[in-house]
Image (cartoon, grey):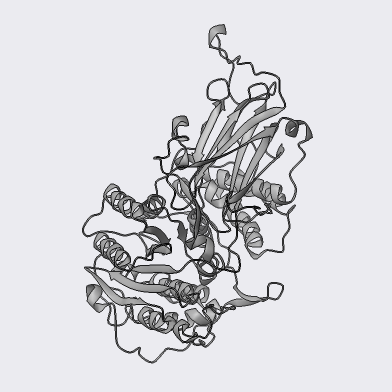
Amino acid sequence: MRALVLASISALLISGLPPTPLPDAAAQPSARAPANIDPDEICAPFIRDWRDGDGGYVGGRGRGFSGALRSAPPPPPSAPSPVVTQERALGRVSVAPMPMSPVRRLPSEDRERYAGEEVAQIEAVADAPVSTFGVDVDTGSYANVRRMLNAGRLPPQAAVRTEEMLNYFRYDYPKPEDRTRPFSISTDMTTTPWNGETRLLRIGLRGYDLGGEGRPPANLVFLIDVSGSMATPDKLPLVQCSLALLASRLERQDRVAIVVYAGAAGLVLEPTSSRTQVMEALGRLRAGGSTAGAAGIQLAYQTARSNMIRGGINRVVLATDGDFNVGVTSNETLVDMVEREREGGITLTTLGFGTGNYNEAMMEQIADHGNGNYAYIDSAREAQKVLDEELASTLFTIAQDVKIQVEFNPAHVSEYRLIGYENRTLAEEDFDNDRVDAGDIGAGHQVTALYEIVPAGGRGWLPERRYPANRRTAEGAPSDELAYLRLRYKLPGETDSRLIEQPVRAGLVQTAQAPTGDSAFAAAVAAYGQLLRGDTNLGRFSFADARALALRARSDDFWRREFVRLTELAERQPFASGQK
């Protein structure tokens, strides 16, 4: 059984193709990175170092960071059997999905940690007409849930954040026309597939793409967990592969340093612009020891400060399973640390890996407070998506502290709920307070939010109140505005926010049709997330219904096709048919 597990994970990491050396950025006449990167070729040398002898890496057990490097690799074993298919339409190699198996709950001994919120409550416009939240562009929850479903497990409800599922996908939002207003704002409305009495209001933001001038120079510090808990094939080998993909996009202007931590922390690669040196250093990493994560973060920030690029990108990229068990382990203490560094111009990206002891609660929280982003990496393909295809949006921030506020007109809306964003909600007064931190948007990033609303006069969720003085009888002045949308953001380097305002037309309620295209796909993803969260306001809507809804949209995208497959896996869950 263990051999089968290792073979399956190995197949997820690489295709078994021989590696092709990457050109060294410092030796290239052009500063541009290679145009075509094959993740399988980059990942091949890392997985080949895996040994099935003691379940770890040769020479790595129990030696702390001093055992993290070795001088020369042993002869590689025979390549694992590849489990890949050719995606001819996309012109690239893709990993074949793992065989589907009955979904079961996570075992009781599982030590993964999540910090879930309750499903957002229904609001009456008469009581709370204003909804305020900070944007979120993290995607980690989607990939983590996918990992559990692929493994035949039911994800805990606390692991599911619907907004991260919505924002995992791209939609056809218009490009912004002017960088002084760094993103476009779109709104549309459809009927609600799971409730004939309500409507879905979709709000979409799209950041501008980097032009031909490219992104600013980057000062990156890879902070890598090499503790004993990382000694499984879905952890350190995939970390090496993922950061190698990021390093493959290095340009002459960029610098990368590598800090590792286990029982202690150490700098194993001084800042360099050489892809070859980065690849070689990554290839020498070995796992073993306890986890002094806080010491590693402190050294990584110190290294980043010492090599600060004014006007450039200064970021720590933390790759770990989040299992901090030595030194400072308090999330609050870590949050204070990354907030101080954030104010000094150094941001934080967290990349999560592995199973069993994964501490997602810490990973997501410190990334949010570090003005970075959080992603979960479960395959080479996901690593390519996050660290190669979406590199600009991952690294280059175009707007900071982005907040959305929607004020509903009681003449047209009686009740509403925001789907997802439970851990991003803000007090109404926080919207105008520039000292209140919120989410950042990178180049090319998109943000999608869905409100489910009850049109005035329609049947809502909330019961009537008995006493006349307690009844919700707010009156709105007749107008053509359903709601008023406000958006605040700061341009990088500015301390005062800018404001965008625009009304949402009331006529959208009368013209709302059943969702199609992108609207249908967004509604399908939202329903999928809410079903996994145990939302009781979806009626009899099922995973099969979500799948049918998703199929109304275009299906020429690998990730959307994969989503359809995940609804099939989720449908196997007992509660999908009403059982608990």
Quarter of the image that includes the N terminus: bottom left
- Decide if residue 458 is on the left or right side of residue 386: right
> Which quadrant of the structure image shows residue 451?
top right
Is residue 526 something one can see in this rendering? yes
Q: Position of residue 414 (x, y in %)?
A: 63, 23
Q: As rendered, which of 404 and 541 lies closer to the eye?
A: 404
Residue farthest to the top, as pictured = 468
Please say if 134 is above or below 353: above
Q: Position of residue 184 (x, y in %)?
A: 63, 48
Q: Position of residue 550 (x, y in %)?
A: 69, 52
Please say if 307 is above or below 526: below
Is residue 536 something one can see in this rendering? no
Q: As rendered, which of 302 and 369 lies closer to the eye?
A: 302
Please say if 163 is above or below 445: above
Number of numbered discs on residues: 0
User: Residue visible at 63% across and 56% down?
Assistant: 170
Q: Position of residue 76 (x, y in %)?
A: 41, 89
User: Residue visible at 67% across and 21% down?
Assistant: 411
Please say if 284 is above or below 110: below
Residue farthest to the bottom, as pictured = 75
Q: As rendered, which of 230 and 317 lies closer to the eye?
A: 317
> Which quadrant of the structure image shows residue 77?
bottom left
